[in-house]
Structures are given as structure tokens and as C-alpha cells.
Image (tube, rainbow, N blue to C red):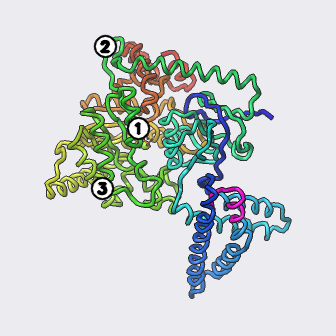
Amino acid sequence: MPFSLHGLAVSQGIAIGRAHLISHATFEVAHYTIRERDVGQEIERFEAALAAVRNDLTVLHADALAPGAPSELSALVHVHAMFLDDPMLAETPKELIRARLCNAEWALVQQMQQLAAQFDEIDDSYLRERKHDIVQVVERVLRVLLGKSRRLTRKGNDKDELIVVAHDLSPADTIQFKNLKIAGFVTDLGGATSHTAIVARSLAIPAVVGLHHARPLINENDQLIVDGTRGVLMVNPDARVLEEYRLRKRELELVRSKLKRLKTARATTLDNIDVSLQANIELPQDIAQVKEVSADGVGLFRTEFLFMNRDTLPTEEEQFEAYKAVAKALAGKPVTIRTLDIGADKTARAIGQSSRQAPNPALGLRAIRYCLAEPQIFLAQLRAMLRASHFGKIQILVPMLAHQHEIEQTLAMIEVAKQQLREKRIKFDENVPVGGMIEIPAAALALGPFLKRLQFLSIGTNDLIQYTLAIDRTDESVSHLYDPLHPAVLRLLAMVIQTAHKAEMPVAVCGELAGDPKLCRLLLGMGLRQFSMHPSQLLEVKQQIVMADTEQLEAKVARILRCDDPERIREQVERL
Ligand code: PEP
Ligand code: MG
């Protein structure tokens, strides 16, 4: 039966395809079919994981018997060991591997879901609660299995367009879509400027998040339409709706292809003001897209994605190669590489954050705070960036700065990295510019040390809005409060841009606001002349710029900035 669900539109466009379900966040496991001749090997992999967990539990049991250990621990470990050896967990998944030719992780999760449903039916509350023990045991086994392979994969024979349906997706999961032909995705959780949504936009695949009940209501292979512009998901639509959306999809493709004509046009306003349009990237492979739209440089290279989906940290050498590749490919255009912004919704196994979740990760040891706490990791990255500066026009950008002492410590670390390179006679650009992201209200309100000690600024509006309005950008339950047009946000933005201009300090916006064509005129009117966004949005923004007159906009925006009424602000922004 056809039905539709409404969520947050996070990545524009229309995708039509078949549902491909990914299980609950805890069990974001690879789901793929194996060849018949690999069944034995897959079963061995499963048995090895069981043996490893059995071993862990034996060690834990010994610890649990030590004097002073809580008495419940020993009982708990005992129950877990019992479940682990029960044929329903130790044997049935093997049968599923054989019968359905599915990988071990997926077989285990299917069986777990089956058992969990049976436990839900039990009247006795004590026994019913044992479901959680089963889930925990399965999690242990999955962790071992995933340690070896945690890749999202497509079945080799998939011809249909696939739409991923998940309860939640991490940025690390989503970045893997770059190598898989995924037509779109939908999730139950997530906010519009979460990094998962940002990656979706960078892939230019339609996505809707915050749907609440998509995962339980949709079956594998259901036909889906994702309307990433309106935030609507249609499930098993009738033929008329399907035809209408096919038509709309073709129209959108036509508009996109017409936009390509702007590729070589200069981003100059009607009153002859040149605007720099740069690109945000996550991985070196994104450079192809940057070139396709002739961006003026890379305004933000989110390096943390190099650290995801792997068990070890990228070495200095690996990072150097990645940064050098981008620097060389941009052939003299600026490449702004941001130091590691790990933490909050971006976690990396190699850094151990997925298992060590902070009580409030967005306010915790994130970005520069993490780097200053881990000098060896930071220094390796700084050396890699500096070495790459010999091959192009590199700028170093530092995220989440708020305190003067953080700026001083960062500069001191850059000096240490430079000295280490000098001692080894390795070449780098001695004058590599260092800039700070303005994404914490404290930084926006007290710009002095930034203006004194750094060479450029880049406003991270995603976080600036999150921290100004005190709403978690990844939490769909407060997404209605995430308002880029809140007067406080607009005034902070305008103030940073104007203060920077007065101090003759280059300033860019690299948050999602910069790539929103509807807000482009507002930013121009605030005086912004440097925008950095995902390449997929660049030509649409350029189209706005070539039709704008900054003088007129400045007068109108000055009035908007004095306004306190959100409805009037919205109306006036629409009329700009
Ligand atoms: C921002 O906060 O606006 C930004 C560009 O950084 P990120 O989205 O990676 O936090
Ligand atoms: Mg940020």
C-alpha cells in the first residue's frame, strides 16, 4: 500500500529506486551475499569471532572474581558466556550463512532480531529483560567481526538504483557511499547540518533525515521516491505519482545541466564586485568535482574523513600524499586544509572515540581541543600539511578555537613542526598562512586575538548556529530550533565579517549557509566576498551572484540586521 513520510530535506534532488535496509545504528553491519565456495571461510570467520569473545569473557570472569569486584559482574559474565554457547547464537547463524549465502555479521543480526522478537513476547518481566543480554553478546561478536571488515557493500548484481534506509548513519558510514552507487538515503534520526547530511550534499545524492519511523515501516526492495527538496519519502507509490516524479527528476536534471554554462563565467556582481567561490572537500578524490565547477580553490578540506573507516591512524606519509595530491591538483589555487576536527558526531575507530563517548560530545574534547591534548597526532598532521605546502598554495585552518591560549598553543605547535622539518632539511613554505575558524560565539564576540595572531578567518556557521542557539545540530527533535535567520546569528555573522574587513583580514564563510542559494544575497549584503561550499552547490550560488547588486543589498541587509521579528526577517530575506 502506498504511504508517505515527512522529514528534514537535507540534500536536494529526487531519487527513485529500491529500498536497501541497513539495521539499527548499533548494528550498522555490512550486508552482502557471498559466493557458495566462500561459505566455509565465512563460517570460520564467524567461529573465530565467537572464540575471541569466549576468550574475552574468560578473562572478564577471572577479573570478576577478584576481591572487591561487584558481585553482579560475575553473574552477568556467566549469563553472557551461556548465551554465547547456546546453539541459537552459535549455530543458527551458520545455517543462515549456508542457506542464504549472507555474510556472518548479517546472519548474526538477523538471528538476534528473531530472538529479540521472541523475548518481547514473554510475560515474565525478568526473562523478557534477558533480551538485552543477548543484544550485548551479539554486539561483542559484531565488534570482533567488524574489526576486520566494516564496509558497506553493494551486491555485485544490483542493477536497480538503491536507496539506503537506516535508523541512523554516521558520517563514517555515509562517506563510504562515495564509492558505491547509492541513489539516495533516508534515516530516522539526524539533523540538517549533521555531518551525515553534509556528506550527502557533497555526494549530490538526495537525502531525507529525521523520518522517525522509516526503518521499521519499510521492507527490503520496497519501491521508494526520495524527494530531497521537500523532505518527503514515498513508499510503494502508485503509477501516477511515479510518473509525475520521473518527470520532475528529468526537469531537475535539465536545470542542472543548464547551470553548467556558468562554469567558466566569473563570479562578479552587477556592480562589478568579484566574489571568490571555493569548494569544501572531504577526500582528495573530491578534486574532480572541484575542477568540474572551476572553483577558485579549496576553502575547507575536512581532513577528519581521512581518519575514518580504518583501524589505525593515517601515517604522516599517507597524510602528506593526500594533501600534496590536492595541492598539486589545484595548481597554485589556495587549498585550505583544516586540522583534525574529530569528536562530536565525527568519530574514528583509530582514535577510540566510538567506544569512549563523552557525556556531551559537541561540548567535549573535539577539534583543536583534542589535537592539543594529543600532541603527537597533531604534530604528525602539521608536518604533513607543511610538507605539502612545498607543492602548492596551502593554508592551515584551525577549528573550534575560543581562547587566546589555544591560539598561542596552536602557533607554538606549528613552530615545533616547522623546526622538526628544518632539522631534517625538508622543504616547506615558511610563510604558510594560519587561519582560525569562527564557530563558537565566544570567538565571534572576542575577535582580538584572532585578528592579531592569525592571517585569515573562516566562519563555520554550522557550529556557530549550534552553539549560539544551544541546539545539537544532529538531533532532529530540536531541528525546528536550528534557525540560521535568528537575529542573534545574523548579528554575530555580520559583526565578524565587518570587524574582519576593518582589520583587513580575509574572511570566508565555509558552513552550509555559504552554499544555500537562498541566503547568498543576504551574505553579500553583509559584505561577504569569499564563500566556500560543496562543489555541487557552487554554480547555483554563482547564478545568484551574477544577478546581485551589492550596494542595493547592503542597504537592505542593514535594515534586516536591526529587525527583531523573525517573521519579518524571513519575509525580507525572501524579498532581497
Ligand atoms: C561549520 O561548523 O560550519 C563547519 C564548516 O565545520 P563542520 O561542519 O565540519 O563542523
Ligand atoms: Mg564546525
In the rendered image, residue 98, in percent from the top left (x then y), is placed at: 69, 61
Amino acid type of the residue that numbered disc 3 sits on in the rendered structure: Glu
Which circle's residue, 1 or 3, is located before the other in the chain?
1
Tell me which corner region of the image, top left, top right, bottom left or bottom right, holds residue 110. Answer: bottom right
Quarter holding ligand 1: top left
Quadrant in which the N terminus appears: top right
**Residue drawn at 61 percent across, 55 percent down:** 34
Position of residue 509 in the picture relative to residue 572 (left or right): left
Amino acid type of the residue that numbered disc 2 sits on in the rendered structure: Asn
Residue 245 visible in the snapshot? yes
Q: Which residue is under mark 2?
A: 272
* Whether residue 387 is situated above or below residue 18 in the rendered picture: below
SS assignment at label 1: helix
Q: Residue furthest bottom?
A: 67
Estimate how packed mark 1 is, as few (under 14), some (14 to 19) or many (20 or more) residues with alpha carbons within 10 Å: some
SS assignment at label 3: helix
Tell me which corner region of the image, top left, top right, bottom left or bottom right, holds residue 434. Answer: top left
- Magenta span: 93-105
Tell me which corner region of the image, top left, top right, bottom left or bottom right, holds residue 298. Answer: top left
Which circle's residue, 1 or 2, is located before the other in the chain?
2
265, 152: nearer the viewer: 152
Mark 1–mark 3 Cα distance, whole angstroms, equals: 21 Å
**Residue drawn at 37 percent across, 46 percent down:** 399
Which circle's residue, 2 or 3, is located before the other in the chain?
2
Q: Which residue is under mark 3?
A: 316
503, 371: nearer the viewer: 371
* Whether residue 138 is situated above or below residue 400 in the rendered picture: below
Q: Which residue is under mark 1?
A: 286
Q: Disc 1, disc 2: CB below 8 Å? A: no
